[in-house]
Image (spheres, coloured by chain):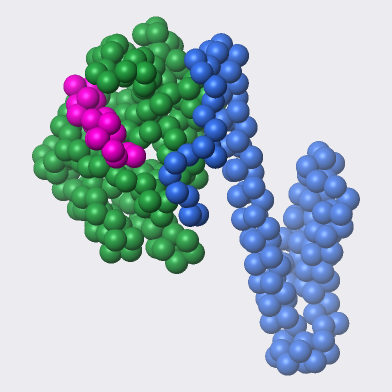
Amino acid sequence: MPPGIQLIALAFALFMAYLTYVDFRRRRFGVAALGFWAIVWGGLAVVSLVPALFVQLSQALRLARPMDLAVVLGMLILSGATYHNFASIHTANRQLERLVREIALSKLEGNQPPTRPRPDPSASDVEIHG
Amino acid sequence: MTNSIAIVIPAHQEGDRITSVLEAIPKAVSGTSRVVVIVVDDGSTDGTSRAASQTGAIVLRHPVNLGAGAALRTGTEAALLLGADIVVHMDADGQHLPEDLPRLIAPLFAGADAATGIRAFGRPMPWLFIIGNRFLSWMTRVLFSLENPDTQCAYRAFWARCWPALRWDSRDYAFASEMLVRGQRSSVRWAIVPIRTVYLDRYKGTGLGDGVRIARKLVRWRILG
């Protein structure tokens, strides 16, 4: 790895490790998440400082350089994190929608008594397939 | 004449217009015993809720903006809680004429489960929206064999008993297509009623991005069910 790239990677790893620590102190996540990201940033720092340590591992995985190993691992982690974000945001969206609807309808239930019993959905005479 | 009707109006930033729209809605509709108007303020910040409340309408408020589909679902659930027999969806921008309401619900008394309006495509609707609406209607016909020349029309009515068959999940404008598709899969009998539309200012409604999202969802519903 060229020294310039090594320095950039090291600076990035240190900065991200600092951000992770600050967010942990702000209780945005727990010890497990702190440990996971510490391994990620620590690994990046080690690869950028002493890439020679990973030469053998790279060769065993039929990769030409330790840099390629770092890139491949980075892409795997990025893919996993992206999927995790997608699932979390999807869940949060659903929860938000349910919460907002419940807040809106709670006003109705509090102030507007039903004029007749709520229709029983199972009493529908429309044939439901799906 | 024992059927009660609930008119559900989703509103977002319609504070200037909602009062005149609500005041134009008739207090009684032929064939029904009671008319209830439910406005769902979808996270407006311009006093839409306050303006709507002053007309005597039932006003529900989403603290944050969720989208037209979500607002209509909240309003429809409220209509069911109030025991409505017929649910009508109407826009908050004055595009739909309350005078068309009796014609819209007439097919329900003639055996239809639901009725949807179809607009006359032409000015002042921009050509891009005309093409978009026609394309989505064409896609719906090709993918689902569903004959409806204006799948995105928001003026519709259905019997409350059809709700389990029509219940949509889409929070955005795709809900209109979703309820048609779900209805077709559940053998809901739709009637189509030509309606007049009034555009008081620039066209507001489904945009290009919404159209792409709806097209994508149509394909997904076709493939994944």
Q: Is residue A80 above or below residue A90?
A: below
Dividing the picture into quarters, in which one does residue B76 lie?
A: top left
Q: Is residue B110 magenta?
A: yes
Q: Is residue B175 above or below residue B137?
A: above
Q: Is residue B223 visible?
A: yes
- Does A52 sit left or right of B60 as displayed? right
Residue B100 covered by magenta stretch: yes
Residue B42 spot, x, y in % from top left: 46, 28
Decide if residue A23 is on the left or right side of residue B179: right
Q: Is residue A2 visible?
A: no
Between A116 and A63, the one nearer to me in the picture: A116
Q: Tell me which chain appears blue.
A: A
Question: Dividing the image into 4 quarters, which one contains the N terminus of chain B?
Answer: top left
Q: How many marks?
A: 0
| Residue pictured at 82% horizontal, 54% vertical | A33
Q: Residue at x 54, y 33 (%)?
A: A120
Q: Nearer the viewer, residue A104 or B89?
A: B89
Quadrant of residue B28 within the rendered picture:
top left
Q: Which residues are magenta?
A: B98-114
Q: Main secondary structure of the magenta part?
A: helix
Query: Percent position (x, y) of residue B35?
Result: 35, 16
- Asked if residue B188 is positioned above or below residue B105 in the image, the reply reads below
| Chain rendered green | B
Q: Tell me where residue B195 sits by quadrant.
A: top left
User: Horizontally, is B44 left or right of B33 in the view?
Assistant: right
What percent of the width, then of the height, locates residue B29?
26, 17
- Looking at this view, is A117 or B9 the one in front? A117
Q: Residue at x 82, y 86 (%)?
A: A57
Q: Position of residue A90 (x, y in %)?
A: 60, 50
Residue under the image location 35 percent in, 57 percent down: B215
